[in-house]
Amino acid sequence: MSAAPDFGAPAATEPEMPPRNPTPSAAERPGPLHDPDPYGTPPYGQPGPWAPAPPVQHPAATPAHGTAIAAPATAPQGPAAPAPPGRQGAGLPAPTGPQGPGASASAGPQGPALPAHPAPRTVPIPTPPGPPIPADALAPAHAQSGALAPAHPQPGALAPAHAQPGASACPTRRPHTAVSSPTDAPPPPALDGTTTPPAPDPWRRYDPWAAASQAHAPLQQTGAAVLTVQQRRRRAKRILVGGALVLALVSGGVGGVVGAFLEREGGTGSVRLPQAGEEPSGRPADSVAGIAARALPSVVTLHVKGSDEQGTGTGFVLDTRGHILTNNHVVEPAASSGDITVTFSSGDTAKARVIGRDTGYDLAVVQVSGVHGLTPMPLGNSDNVQVGDPVVAIGAPFDLAGTVTSGIISAKERPITAGGESGDGSDVSYVDALQTDAPINPGNSGGPLLDSRGRVVGINSAIRSAGSGSDSGGGQAGSIGLGFAIPVNQARRVAEELINTGKATHPVIGVTLDMGYNGDGARIGAKGGDGGPAVTTGGPADRAGLEAGDVITGVDGKPVHSGDELIIRTRAHRPGDHLRLTVRRDGRTKEVSLTLGSSGRH
């Protein structure tokens, strides 16, 4: 082959590099069972330097969206050299330039050649022991002096020849070389000749025994670096200190609150029992509490002192002029001479005087003077009361002022008599009473009996005790649930007469009764109390045709069983009212009508 033409410049020859390891000849080495591998992978079934394990890949932090990334600096590249013949498609770059024995690479007119990429690192292949192989037998076809040609010659540089003179034209097996990683290449020099240090590479080979550096620390899912042991310790210390401060503050606050509570409640040694809290003071108007709240300001307590005896009773205000209604037997000790003191619910006291009283009805009216702001008690209608209706009694039993009890109406039109201590019957009271089971005791006499609306329907007057029979309040027997009250309709008429005239009128038939008669009904006596006729001449009974010895067995259709009961039934009416009497005479019964007369009593 002819020598390469000279372009006027001396040929640049590469220094010869002695072979590092002797390699066997191509004739002695067994041929591969497959096509030549450009990556240097050893033949299957043969020992050789296996490729190292791929590096453990660590994900690098991805810059945020929109962040500008600087482009890597690149060295100027020359024109690509064509692949040598016979090596096309092998995947390796081929040198360019004239070929033939003795060809050498020479610098072109463009200047000295600079490699665009570093030469790949060669990995020696261990060979089995045997006779030495001549060096020229395994010389590469493209090397002139044993040195490897650059993978990418610079523009203008001559490529080395592929074979030496006298060498076999058949291409020999190239030594196995390890494929170099692009990251192993040194950075290209800058224009000023300086070399930029390589940037940290997270894709380096992983060494499990190497100390971790902060630059190549593993990353979390958020992209932040994992804290080191010292950083975690410092962070734990800060958390512990902060938690201790918070715990101290909370403990101090709780301790202060508990201490204040214990100090206020008397310490831990005292016993504190559960108790309901405060509730609204208002009550329904129709409840006992609501009724009592409205009625108590109108109820008074009377303390009576006479020359021979004294006592306590109850009354209630009738009007703003100071008139107070009570029982006759309450004020009777001071009727002629004595002292009456009235105590109001507010605690104020005032002197009172008797305006009028009546023993037959057991009612009296007293008046206080110099007292203002009195609250009159509203009056109801006793005819509207039904058995079973709830009632409230207010009084001063045994001088306990403002005592409130409750019950029901047990019966109506219950005929009772009270008094009679004088012996002549002048002090006997006849009452067509309301019976109640509300507790009434001595001291309740004269107090109001109220309905569910707080209106007066009766005046408490008498009780039936277990040992002494009927008691009008003078004794000290207690209640057994049998109390009696004067109906307010009767009390109202009597009170008006006492206030206006000082005395009360009584409706009369005009006959004298035989109180010793034991038969059924009320019999007219044989003669009057003064020795005159038993039927008053010109009176209501005389005009109706009644005679001595007639027996009255009914009033307005209601049966009458005794003389007292006839008096009670009669006094339940006003003078001038019409009565229808059932009369039995000589075994025959007939009905007669009459108009009640009037008689005045002090």
Image (spheres, helix red, strand yellow):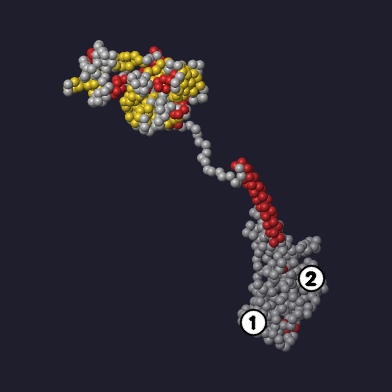
* Residue 261 image point, x, y percent: 61, 43
Query: Residue placed at 69% from the left, 85% from the top?
Result: 128
- Which residue is outermost to the top? 538
The answer to whether residue 437 of the structure is visible from this angle is no
Of 341 and 125, nearer the camera is 341
Distance Cα–Cα, label 2 vs label 1: 42 Å
* Residue 365 image point, x, y percent: 42, 18
Of 304 and 438, nearer the camera is 304
Q: Looking at the picture, which amino acid does disc 1 mark?
A: Gln
* Residue 501 image point, x, y percent: 39, 13
Q: Is residue 236 left or right of 527 when viewed as pictured?
A: right
Which mark, residue 144?
Answer: none
Which element carries disc 1, helix, strand or loop? Answer: loop
For mark 1, what is the residue? 46
Q: Looking at the picture, which amino acid does disc 2 mark?
A: Ala
The answer to whether residue 165 of the structure is visible from this angle is yes
* Residue 335 image point, x, y percent: 43, 17
Establish if 413 lies above or below 9. above
Which mark, residue 107?
Answer: 2
Query: Residue placed at 25% from the left, 11% from the top?
Result: 538
Establish if 549 lies above or below 269. above
Of 200 and 387, nearer the camera is 387
Q: Is residue 552 left or right of 77 when viewed as pictured?
A: left
Circle nearer the viewer, 2 or 1: 1
Q: Earlier in the sequence, mark 2 or mark 1?
A: 1
Query: Residue placed at 32% from the left, 14% from the top?
Result: 599
Which element carries disc 2, helix, strand or loop? Answer: loop
Q: Quadrant of the N terminus?
A: bottom right
Query: Residue placed at 35% from the left, 27% from the top?
Result: 434
Q: Quadrant of the C terminus?
A: top left
In the rendered image, which quarter is residue 289 located in?
top left
- Which residue is outermost to the left? 587
